[in-house]
Amino acid sequence: MNNENIEQANWYVVHTYSGYENKVRSKIENMIENGKAHNVFDVKVPMEEYEDIKGGKKVSKERKIFPGYVLIKMIVDSKNWYLIRNTRGVTGFIGPDGEPVPLSAKEIREFGIEKSEPVQTVKQVVEIDLEIGDEIEIISGPFSGFNAKITGINTEKQFVTALIDILGRDTAAEIEFTDIKQ
């Protein structure tokens, strides 16, 4: 890899078809290795690690932080713009009229892009012991103080779907695990 111009490179965001993020990353990495993408230095698909509960056991899993997006460190010139833009699965750069806009230093810091390990954040998982049909008390959020009956549980996204009796009518709402008391 040619690193002589890396100080002048910026991180850019490329939009991809959903599910194509890793394929796009792989194709761009191949172009970098083969010397076809001069002044393209790195490509990442931001991932986060989370814990899910399957069959009563904690299972560590990974998911994309920004589905449909890939981060690329590069110097934008007409050749690189054309190569990246015409990579299969890429729909375009993020910016006005498809013109690449670099990420700010704050965004790079917040996303952890420049760290040596893969881009990751660890999300705190709240464990609940509830089933569909259980009654819950809502302790925070817009429905604080109401009771509700659970109609669905999404452990991956950490919320329950519940019916809340508001003025004699059942109203469906999604309530985060952290907003309920078992």
Image: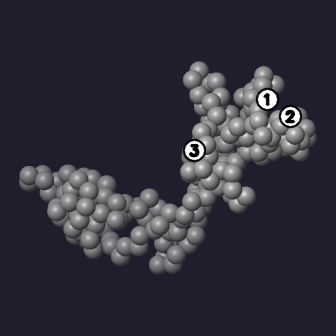
Name the element at disc 2: loop
Q: In the rendered view, would you say 52 is above or below 166?
A: below
Towards the viewer: 169 or 15: 15
Can residue 119 be seen by looking at this rendering? yes
List the residue tagged with mark 1: 80
Q: Which mark is residue 107?
A: 3
Q: CA distance from mark 3 to mark 2?
A: 25 Å
Disc 3 residue type (three-letter): Glu
In three-dimensional space, the C-alpha distance between marks 3 and 1, rounded to whole angstroms, equals: 23 Å
Question: What is the number of the mark on residue 51?
Answer: none
Left or right of 68 on screen, residue 44:
right
Q: Residue at x 80, y 40 (%)?
A: 6
Q: Amino acid at mark 1?
A: Asn
Q: Quadrant of residue 13?
A: top right
- Return the disc, 1 or 2, that comes first in the chain's sequence: 2
How far across and down, in percent of the image, does residue 161 sit? 31, 58
Residue found at x 31% / y 58%: 175
Q: Classify mark 1: helix, strand or loop.
A: helix
- Residue topped by disc 2: 38
In this rendered view, identify the residue nearer to me: 64 or 72.
72
Count of numbered tags: 3
Which numbered disc, 3 or 1, marks the residue closer to the eye?
Answer: 3
Q: CA distance from mark 1 to mark 2?
A: 7 Å
Q: Are marks 1 and 2 in contact (CB under 8 Å)?
A: yes
Sequence-wise, the earlier of marks 3 and 2 is 2
